[in-house]
Image (tube, helix red, strand yellow):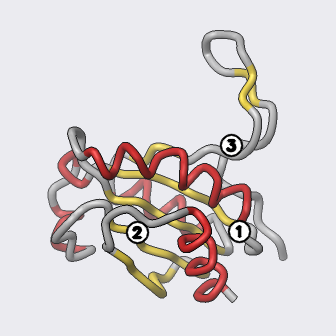
Amino acid sequence: MRMESNTVPNEVETTDGESSGGKRPVSLSDADAIDAFVADADAALVEFYTDGCGICASMEPVIGNVARGADADLAVGTVNPRDDPPLVERFDVRSVPLFVLFVDGEPVARRADGFISGDDLTAWVDEHAA
C-alpha cells in the first residue's frame, strides 16, 4: 500500500495568496510530530536545525530540491530540537544541521557533515532509502 507524501504538493496556495511550485519541507514542532510524520511516509528525511545556524539556513533550498529530486517518494521535514529538548538526547544531536533518514518509520541513516550539496544529499537518500 502506498502512502501519501508528507511534503507539500506542487502548486500549493500560500497564506499570502501566491502559489509555490514543488514539494516543500514540513515544519515539525516536537517528538510527537516527528513520530506521526515518519509513520505516514515510506521514506522521510528530517533535518535538525537551530535558529541562527548559517549552514542550516543555507540548507533550506537544498532540502526542498532533494524533496523534489530523490528517486524515493520522500517526505521532508525540519525540526528545531531546542523546541523539544528531549529530541537532543533521543536523536543524539551533537551538531546541526543533522539529517536523519527514516524508512518505514525507523531511522536508517544519519549525516551531520555541515553543508551538503543537493546532489550529494539526494544520492545519500537514494542509497539508504532503496
Q: Position of residue 43 (x, y in %)?
A: 63, 73
Residue at the image point whose x is 61% and y is 69% from the top: 119
The residue where tag 2 is placed is: 99
Q: Amino acid at mark 1?
A: Ala
Q: Amino acid at mark 3?
A: Val
The residue where tag 1 is placed is: 70
Q: Is residue 55 above or below residue 115?
A: above
Within the image, what quadrant is residue 125 found in? bottom right
Q: Amino acid at mark 2?
A: Phe
Neighbourhood count class around disc 2 (C-alpha, 10 Å): few under 14, some 14–19, many 20 upward: many
Residue at the image point whose x is 82% and y is 71% from the top: 2
Q: Position of residue 97 (x, y in %)?
A: 31, 61
Residue 114 located left or right of residue 40: left
| N-terminal label among 3 and 1 | 3
Neighbourhood count class around disc 1 (C-alpha, 10 Å): few under 14, some 14–19, many 20 upward: some
- Count numbered badges in the picture: 3
| N-terminal label among 2 and 3 | 3
Q: Secondary structure at mark 2?
A: strand
Residue 20 located left or right of residue 28: right
Neighbourhood count class around disc 3 (C-alpha, 10 Å): few under 14, some 14–19, many 20 upward: some
Q: Quadrant of the C terminus?
A: bottom right
The residue where tag 3 is placed is: 8
| N-terminal label among 1 and 2 | 1
Residue at the image point whose x is 63% and y is 64% from the top: 40
Give the CA separation, mark 2 to mark 3: 19 Å
Q: Nearer the viewer, residue 104 or 78?
A: 78
Within the image, what quadrant is residue 126 found in? bottom right
Question: In the image as oriented, which residue stretches furthest toward the top?
Answer: 16
